[in-house]
Image: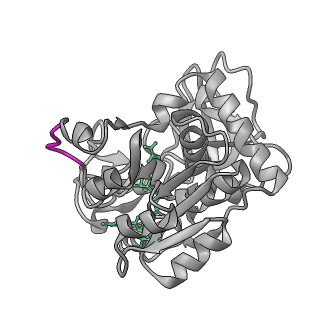
Amino acid sequence: MAKRIQFARTGGPEVLELVDTTPAEPAPGEVRVRNQAVGLNFIDIYFRTGLYPAPSLPSGLGTEGAGVVEAVGEGVTHLKAGDRVAYAQGPLGAYAEQHVLPAEKVVVLPESIDVETAAASMLKGLTVQYLLRQTAPLQGGETILWHAAAGGVGSIACQWAKALGVKLIGTVSSPEKAALAEKNGAWATIDYTKEDVVERVRELTGGAMCDVVYDSVGKDTWETSLDCLKPRSLMVSFGNASGPVDGVNIGILNQKGSLFVTRPSLNGYADTRERLEWMAGELFEMLESGKVKVDIAQRYPLADAGKAQEALQGRQTTGSTILLP
Ligand code: NDP
């Protein structure tokens, strides 16, 4: 038997329950991983609340983890039992001692990267890779605005942007989070609970405003974000921490300066094995070079997944959070 977290109905953290399951044998093309660490992500909360529908209920939860391959299905050639691996995509169910998923979503870890670091950075780091290197191919010298700069994705983004020579202005909700983002390489921070974000961006950029805005907060910040952009520049809306952006009149892009907008996802960028390997390779290089250091600021036992999600949703966390099976 193996333990996993599942939910039979959508709702608050209380719907998450720890249950015993019989681990499945991997089907052709699949692999079974014994998780040693599991990544906690805001997207898990969207599935738990029903904002993103789970394919069926009861459902497992989570898509990020790292550990050791236990068994491989027919036709799997790039992995074998005993390999140290990590993953950030595939079916819900990473909050578990064992997880079965398509082998093409699983990458072998370099020796130098430990499983906790991998579980804390695969989904968040691949996200930063595509946001900074693909969605907007930054050259260095640009100024960008990044919301939730002290969070999991944000902490990696501050360091990666600095390494690219990009000036990242990060928004945060406290002086402690501001200090953390600056330590991670943010060029400047704005405490949105005390300061007017648009006015501060204007001051910091000498009136020029930003080349790209990365907004994972969604509903609460959509319009402020558009106001922080240069004419004809790019708004990247990639999350819904405060609720989804809906009911938008597309004419607003004209009014705010002939802007561009995109709503990307990791699955849309890491959509082939080749692309996943390239993106993971860049992330591993950043980790191995020390240009990106992953801050695992919270660790919870798997059984406390609900408490961990409560903390993430309640803005009490910084950096990455992992669950330990
Ligand atoms: P974080 O660790 O960044 O936690 C979320 C942070 O958002 C909070 O700490 C808080 O920071 C800020 N926030 C602002 N408003 C709210 C609100 N109303 N409720 C809760 N938090 C709020 O989480 P992750 O690193 O896991 O994810 C960051 C974002 O990136 C999420 O929105 C997630 O959905 C998105 N994402 C998108 C992906 C994609 O491919 N599209 C992939 C991965 C993540 P503060 O206190 O400073 O305001």
Q: Is residue 236 left or right of residue 150?
A: left
Q: Is residue 49 left or right of residue 135?
A: left
Residue 70 sits above or below residue 120 on the image: above
Residue 55 sits above or below residue 117 on the image: above
Which sits in the foreground, 51 or 319?
Answer: 319
Q: Can you tell me which quadrant of the image ligand 1 is in?
A: bottom left
Colouring convention used in this rendered image of the protein: one colour
Which sits in the foreground, 195 or 282?
Answer: 195
Q: Is residue 119 visible?
A: no
Residue 306 sits above or below residue 34 on the image: below
Where is residue 273? Give x, y as percent.
62, 23
| Residue furthest to the top | 75
Residue sitting at x 75%, y 35%: 81
Where is residue 56? Give x, y as percent.
27, 38
Q: Is residue 126 left or right of residue 196?
A: right
Residue 54 sits above or below residue 189 on the image: above
Question: What are the residue bounds of the magenta stretch?
Answer: 245-249
Residue sitting at x 57%, y 63%: 322
Residue sitting at x 68%, y 62%: 294
Q: Is residue 234 visible?
A: yes
Our reading of the magenta stretch's main secondary structure is loop
Indicate yes or no whether the magenta region holds residue 292.
no
Where is residue 101? Give x, y as percent.
54, 34
Which sits in the foreground, 93 or 169?
Answer: 169
Where is residue 303? Give x, y as percent.
47, 68
